[in-house]
Amino acid sequence: MDPLLDRFISESRLMVDEALDRYIPSPEIEPRVLHEAMRYSLFAGGKRVRPILAMAAADMIGADKFCVIPLAAALECIHTYSLIHDDLPPMDDDDLRRGKLTSHKVFGESTAILAGDALLTVAFEILSGFETSRIIPSHTIVEVIRDVAVACGSRGLIAGQIMDMIYEGEAADDSIIEKIMLNKTGALIRASVTNGARLAGANRKEIDILFQFGEKLGKIFQIKDDLLDLEGDATKLGKAVRKDDKRGKATYPSVHGPDRSKKLVMSLLAEANKMIEPFGKKAQILILLAEYVSQRVN
């Protein structure tokens, strides 16, 4: 990994983890099992990609990463909630996540559902109680809250998830796969970069550019995820592989094969990098992050 990116990721991840530790109630606080379950999944070794993207976007616009810490923490809470629910028996029925037993395997299905619900709820508690509200206009905070809500709702993440379920075992064309990618993974990634920039004071044109960059990056992330399920190492991934193929999931690799999928990833990466050329050298971290996402092995 590039040393500059390695340092940025390490520093950002530490800041996010410290914030999450402050925001999420201790397992000593009742109901103990709920708070323990929330923390179990939050601190299970996630890469913090979405929070780091938000911080990188803010950094590119010229703001201190501190100004987006609440957003970064909220994004990770939302992402983790989605994983807990995704792993449940009625959904993907996974036993392992990041090399550890999934939440419902440790705490039971009912507690896992409630832990996911609580993480989604606390995300908006964090956003509405923005620590940096002294320096960020209230109308900007409201815009961020609304945009994040749309990104994780029935027109975003949940839309992608239900389409993923509906077309399981069905013949899906490229338009369906595109919608799944843009929503299931892309919506929260788009919201990460656009709202990180919005909190940093980006103008409309800059936010529009980052919206398009986020769409490209979301597709890269999802195709790479699908490729890793198809060809990845279960030990490195920390979860079972070839699940999508067995369940007949509608993915780009399942329709077009690994080789064409890898070519599309490289094409999307080139398009994403070109998209943020107007930001010049200030976009270096985002460019490196896009490359990191395209080359990841877990």
Image (spheres, rainbow, N blue to C red):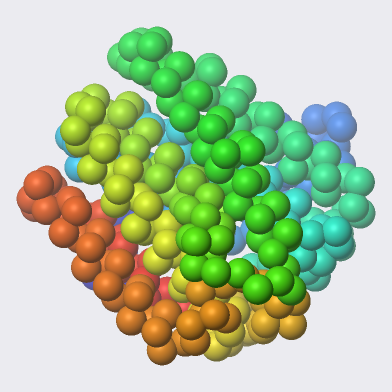
Residue 173, percent across and down? 55, 69
Quarter of the image for residue 38 reads: top right
Quarter of the image for residue 45 reads: bottom right
Q: Residue at x 44, y 49 (%)?
A: 189
Residue 171, percent across and down? 65, 73
Quarter of the figure with the N terminus? bottom left
Q: How many marks?
A: 0
Residue 216, percent across and down? 34, 58
Residue 47 seen by the camera: no
Q: Is residue 273 left or right of residue 104?
A: left
Q: Residue at x 57, y 81 (%)?
A: 254
Q: Nearer the viewer, residue 175 or 275?
A: 175
Q: Nearer the viewer, residue 39 or 126?
A: 126
Quarter of the image for residue 65 reads: top left
Residue 242 seen by the camera: yes
Vertical comparison of 228 with 119: above or below: below
Q: Residue at x 69, y 64 (%)?
A: 167
Q: Is residue 268 left or right of residue 31?
A: left
Q: Nearer the viewer, residue 59 or 140?
A: 140
Residue 11, percent across and down? 35, 50
Vertical comparison of 82 with 68: above or below: below
Q: Residue at x 34, y 11 (%)?
A: 137
Q: Is residue 118 left or right of residue 134?
A: right
Vertical comparison of 295 with 24: above or below: below
